[in-house]
Image (cartoon, rainbow, N blue to C red):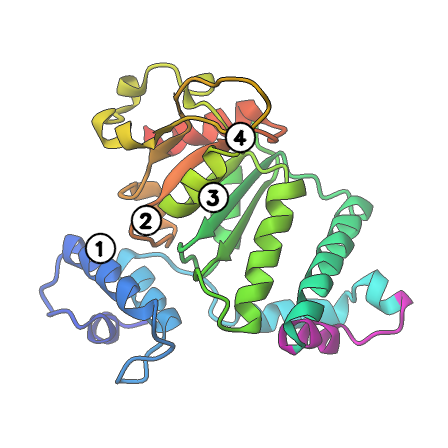
Amino acid sequence: MERDKALEILELPQDAAIEDVEKRILVLYKKFRQLEKDERGYTIEDIDKAYKSLKGIFYSDPEEERKKKQRRENPNPIFKLLKIDEEKALNFIYYYKWHALGILAVIVFAVMTIISVVKKVDPNLRILIAGKIYMSETTAFEEKITNELETVEKAQVQNIYLSGEARSEADVAMQTKFTVEIAVGNNDIFIIDEEKYFMLATQGAFKPVKDFIGDLRALGIDEELNKDLIVTMELNDGITYEPELYGIDVSDNAYLLDAGIISERMIMAFGSAGEFPQNAAAFAELILK
């Protein structure tokens, strides 16, 4: 995308600095939480493309078409065995009634899990980005992490955007997927919004930060900025738990912003069911250093 066009979409002057771009994208993110298109006809995807263009982040535009072509050339063996048109099945999952959609979302998750086992796709770092956090594309971020961390053979990054309301079938599908991920996802790293952090931290979804990071100050982490993230688990198991820091504020983290991850506040936490704690700690050091 040309610079002039990108600046026009973000409504910035020609002499805008990169700091102006980063401030503007957060303003537009808040604006588009309640909009599909603005008065000029631009969508959040247009805003994200313009932002990445100005930041120098390049990616393939026709990603969805590529995925469709890949599905045509390498059909899902489960759908093929059942003689079901994969595209129609996926469309059905998206558009069908809410209760059926939730069931089908679980089925699709189970199918994809089976396929990943069959194909021996075995990520050794799983990252879940969830809540009111927007990320248009995850593949490039997965590749970047895999290339920069020696111990990570394959990183898996998922983005589940949760609007906070069940206004559409898509909202219900995302909430269902999020519930499944919390139950059986075994995610090593969570990057979530403030609301989901406090909800999950009190339920024992995370391990204390101190188990992964020794001296916070050595990594330039402002302890005062994270003071409000100290919480007490409430599991109703007869055990009294001490208050712990389970998350780190990464709202202004350059590594995440460069990947196009956008939110008012982002918190990184370590999953209690994560299978690769060493890689989780390595990822934290990578983005915080």
Circle 3 or circle 4, nearest the eye: 4
- Tell me which numbered mark, 4 or 2, is placed earlier along the sequence: 4
Which one is nearer the viewer's eye here, 262 or 177? Answer: 177
Up/down of 41 relative to 202, above or below: below
Quarter of image, res 272: top right
What amino acid is found at the position of numbered circle 3 in the picture?
Answer: Lys
Up/down of 84 relative to 238, above or below: below
Up/down of 219 relative to 112, above or below: above
Q: CA distance from mark 2 to mark 3?
A: 14 Å
Q: CA distance from mark 3 to mark 4?
A: 30 Å
What amino acid is found at the position of numbered circle 4 in the picture?
Answer: Gly
Which one is nearer the viewer's eye here, 26 or 239? Answer: 239
Residue pictured at 66% horizontal, 76% vertical: 97
Mark 2 sits on what residue? 257
Boundaries of the magenta span: 81-95
What amino acid is found at the position of numbered circle 1 in the picture?
Answer: Glu
Q: Which SS type dominates the magenta stretch?
A: helix
- Tell me which numbered mark, 2 or 3, is placed earlier along the sequence: 3
Q: Are marks 1 and 2 in contact (CB under 8 Å)?
A: yes
Up/down of 189 relative to 58, above or below: above
Quarter of image, res 174: bottom right
Mark 4 sits on what residue? 204
What crowding class fits label 1: few (fewer than 14 Cα within 10 Å), some (14-19), or many (20 or more)?
some
Residue 22 numbered mark, or none: 1
Position of residue 52 measured from the top left corner of the image (x, y, whole percent): 33, 60
Q: Is residue 90 left or right of residue 29?
A: right
Residue pictured at 39% horizontal, 70% vertical: 45
